Amino acid sequence: MQTKNEHVRVFAPAKINLFLHVGQKRPDGFHELESLVAFARTGDELCLAPADGISLEIDGPFAGGLSAGPDNLVLKAARALAAAGACAEGARIRLTKNLPVASGIGGGSSDAAAVLRGLNALWELNRPPEFLCEIGSAIGSDVPVCVEPVASWMAGRGEKVTALAGIPAVPMVLVNPGVPVPTGTVFRALNDRRGTGLSPPPAMESIEALVSYLELTGNDLELPARAIAPAVGEALDALAAEDGVFFARMSGSGATCFALVETAEAAQTAAAALRAAHPSWWCAVG
């Protein structure tokens, strides 16, 4: 986050569910979840400036998929923080949307969390992350884990977040085949689930240790997502076939898939090959 001339710039990284286990439905209508969450090096960008009111404009390659209306999570987050902080100031918010919309990598949630961080600085509220997480949990289940975008253990419906040390930084390739996979539809098609109750992982020193751990887990939403959108399976197969790939899985409810890759150079090479073979897919190195 950088502040200059009363402007605050905030990065909103893609949120990756390295695994996602789904438990029973709760009385509040949400499912119990547990997930190991990491954040990619690719993401959206926000620029915040002082203004009389709160407004939002959207640009970037995926701007067309979003409305800047009152239901946008960025505006909801900004107004919730203003109310909770008893702040009468405003902000002009520009969101550069680099991530595909509704794609299982928490773009909207990460944007909402980023605006909470950014306005906390712009308005000089000096509120702690716990305060921002509490506001975020009322906006969306994935917002709290994005408030401090570091490797984390996520539980409950998403509101229970524990930052984890000892998770190795691993080069990653992200692919989205450009097909819609509505989250509600995926959950309704979910039959088999691992349930919750797994303990957070111990510290790991290598990608091999991380992969060994992840191989004991899964994404419970991957099977129904693949049935709804076969392109998810195509993306996973394409990722797994690239040299240097250790591990491939779908993130969230899809359709974005990720691969953990041996080196940064191998990730760049794999991404270039995937872009050439599938020019209609979104592909990024994370």
Image (tube, helix red, strand yellow):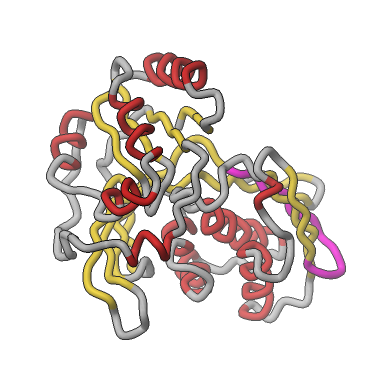
**Going 64% across and 70% down the picture, which residue do you hit?**
76
The image quadrant where one finds the C terminus is top left
Q: Position of residue 186 (x, y in %)?
A: 36, 59
Task: Magenta stretch: give its range.
Answer: 44-54
Q: Position of residue 271 (x, y in %)?
A: 45, 21
Above or below 120: residue 7? above
Above or below 63: residue 140? below
**Going 81% across and 60% down the picture, which residue do you hit?**
50
Q: Position of residue 20 (x, y in %)?
A: 28, 54
Quadrant in which residue 117 is drawn: bottom right
**65 relative to 217 in the view: left or right:** right
* The stretch drawn in magenta includes residue 46: yes
Q: Position of residue 147 (x, y in %)?
A: 49, 58
Depth check: 74 or 224 in front?
224
**Going 42% across and 59% down the picture, which residue do you hit?**
145
Depth check: 10 or 257 in front?
257
Depth check: 58 or 160 in front?
58
**175 relative to 52 in the view: left or right:** left
**Going 70% across and 40% down the picture, which residue do you hit?**
60
Depth check: 199 or 239 in front?
239
Magenta stretch: dominant secondary structure? strand
